Amino acid sequence: MASPFDPDHRYTVEEYLRLERTAHEKHEYRNGRVFPAGNPPVEPRRPGGEVRENRIEQNLSSLLGPPDELRRRGLLIRLGSFMSRSDSFAFDRFRADSASKAFLLISPDDVRVELYERSPNGSWSFAIGQRLSDVMRAKVASFELSLAAVYDGVDVWADPDADLD
C-alpha cells in the first residue's frame, strides 16, 4: 500500500496527525519530515544534544517559568524534532483537554519552533518560526517567545533556506 506522505514535503504536526490517523502503516515525524516507523532517514548525528536540550530548557524556564507552572497554565512543551505515533496520541489527548491552551515543539538541533494554540472557539492554529529574529506570539496562552532568547547559548544548525540574523 502506498504511503499518504510525500517524502519531499515538509509537514506540520497537524498535517502529520491528520494523515497518520488514516494511514495503513505506522509513520514517525521528525522535523517536518514523515517516514515509515522504524525506518528513519539516515541523518548525521550531532554530539552534545543533551547539552543543547538542557540549555534550551533553562532558557525556557527563565522566559516562561518552571515546567509545573507551564502545565498549570495549559502549556505543553516538547523538545525534539521527532514525534512518534505514541507522541501523536499524547498530543491528541492534550488537545482534547479543554484546559490545554498551547503546544510548542522545539528543535534542539536547528532553529525551528512550532506553536499550536487553541482559539477561544476551540479550533487550533499553527505558527512556525525558523529564524532567530522570529517571535512566537500566543494570544490565548498569553506569552511572546523570541527564538533568539530560546536558542541563546545553543549551537544549532542553521537552515540554509532561512534568513538567519
Image: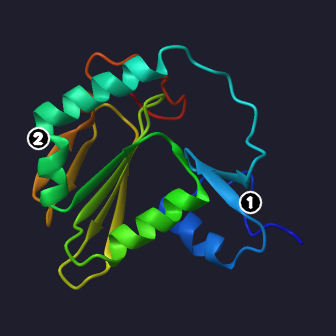
Q: Amino acid at mark 2?
A: Gly
Counting from the top left corner in percent of width and height, residue 145 is at: 19, 42
Q: Amino acid at mark 1?
A: Asp
Q: Is residue 120 above or below residue 117?
A: below
- First along the sequence among labels 1 and 2: 1
The quarter of the image holding the N terminus is bottom right
Counting from the top left corner in percent of width and height, residue 103 is at: 31, 58
Return the residue at label 2: 65
Q: Is residue 151 above or below residue 24?
A: above
Q: Nearer the viewer, residue 75 or 139?
A: 75
What is the number of the mark on residue 6? 1
Instruction: State the SS at label 1.
Output: loop
Residue at image position (58%, 64%) is 16
Counting from the top left corner in percent of width and height, residue 153 is at: 28, 16
Residue 40 visible, this orientation: yes
Residue 165 visible, this orientation: no
Left or right of residue 119: residue 47: right
Residue furthest out toward the bottom: 121
Disc 1 vs disc 2: Cβ atoms closer than 8 Å?
no
Q: Residues within 10 Å of mark 2 (few under 14, many from 20)?
A: few
Query: Marks 1/2: CA distance?
Result: 38 Å
Residue at image position (13%, 42%) is 64
Instruction: State the SS at label 2.
Output: loop
